[in-house]
Amino acid sequence: MNKVTITNDNSSEVPASRNRPIRKSPRISTLTHSTENIINDRKREPRKAASTPKKIKFTESLNAEEVLRSSYATSNKTPKYGLKRLGYSFFDVPCEDLAKKLLGTVLVRRLDDGTIVKGRIVETECYPGGDDKASVSHDGRITEKIRAVYMKPGTMYVYVTYGMYHCFNISSQENIYLFTGPGAAVLLRAVDPLEGVEYMQQERGKRKKNTTPEKSKELELHDLCNGPAKLCISFNITKSTSNEQDLCSWDGMWIEEDKSGQKSLNSNHIVVSQRIGIDSVGIKWASKPLRFYLLGNSSVSRRDKIKEKEFEEKIKCI
């Protein structure tokens, strides 16, 4: 190997092999280039706008009067089953009146295989539309999903909640009260089982997690339908099978008077309370007395003991 010779003018004599240009490491060069590209891309990339909640798209082609008119035109079917069912005149009343009238009547479900499931309605809620912010039809809102509440009285409106459960409503007459309007419906909150209890147990058992049919314990009778989602599971009511069906003519479901002699309470014994699970709409509408249930029935989803006490005191004074 050649040595470097030091001279008096402080210069150095470098071997020929050291005069070759230094080659840059490809790895370093590539890394530098990639880093520069990333930095430049980030500079060029526009900032993403802050996420905003999706706006509900209203369907301009839908008109409440046309939906109502068309529902009458397609309701001339004569049912084969449930010939003693309650007819159109029963449902053709203001929402609050229907919510009270339904208490004590019997909900009947006929499945495709002929299985019959029955239960006495013991709890309802009124969703009158119009100014009521808890109603899906608030301020005349109308979309394809909620068409049923604008259809003829007695039409089923079934919707999905929490992405997996169903709730069942019945459309009523357009209301006469000041804060209401078109698109009124009654939510069925609880039913007292009468017939088809084995089927109800089976359907509820399917929803239990980490249990087999052999290990699944039977639910108490009053726990089978004491809530809107439980009711739909027990009666096999889903959006795909039941939404927009006419209770006056559909062979799959109807409502009839209770003639079993098992009615435990007079339907006039109605407790009036506020609706459940709608605090997000504000205290004004959440506190409206639009929930109704039969006093003393064990299948009621949630008791209002303060209102019950007031009601009992009122009865004593009569």
Image (cartoon, grey):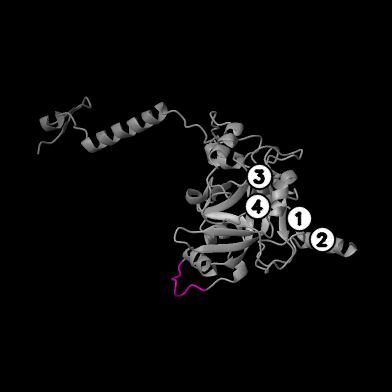
The residue depicted at 72 percent of the width and 53 percent of the height is: 100
Disc nearest the viewer among 1 and 3: 3
Question: In the rendered image, which residue does mark 4 sit on?
Answer: 277
In this picture, which residue range is highlighted in magenta? 210-217
Residue neighbourhood size for the residue with mark 3, other residues' Cα within 10 Å, grouped as few (<14), some (14–19), many (≥20): many
Q: Residues within 10 Å of mark 4 (few under 14, many from 20)?
A: few
Q: Mark 2 or 3, which is nearer the eye?
A: 3
**CA neighbours of label 2 inside 10 A, class few (<14), some (14 to 19), many (20+):** some
Of the residues under marks 2 and 4, which one precedes in the sequence? 4
Q: CA distance from mark 3 to mark 4?
A: 22 Å
Quadrant location of residue 9?
top left
Q: Earlier in the sequence, mark 2 or mark 3?
A: 3
**Residue 70's disc number:** none
Q: CA distance from mark 4 to mark 1?
A: 16 Å
Q: Is 86 displayed left or right of 179 in the figure?
A: left
Image point 52% across, 45% down: which residue? 77
Q: Which residue has dot 1 on it?
A: 272
Real-space Cα separation, disc 2 to disc 3, in angstroms: 27 Å
Per the image, the residue denoted by label 3 is 172
Q: Amino acid at mark 2?
A: Phe
Disc 2 and disc 4: Cα gap in Å?
Answer: 23 Å
Is 3 or 232 nearer to us in this picture? Answer: 232
CB of mark 1 within 8 Å of CB of mark 2?
yes
Q: Reply above or below: 301 against 13.
A: below
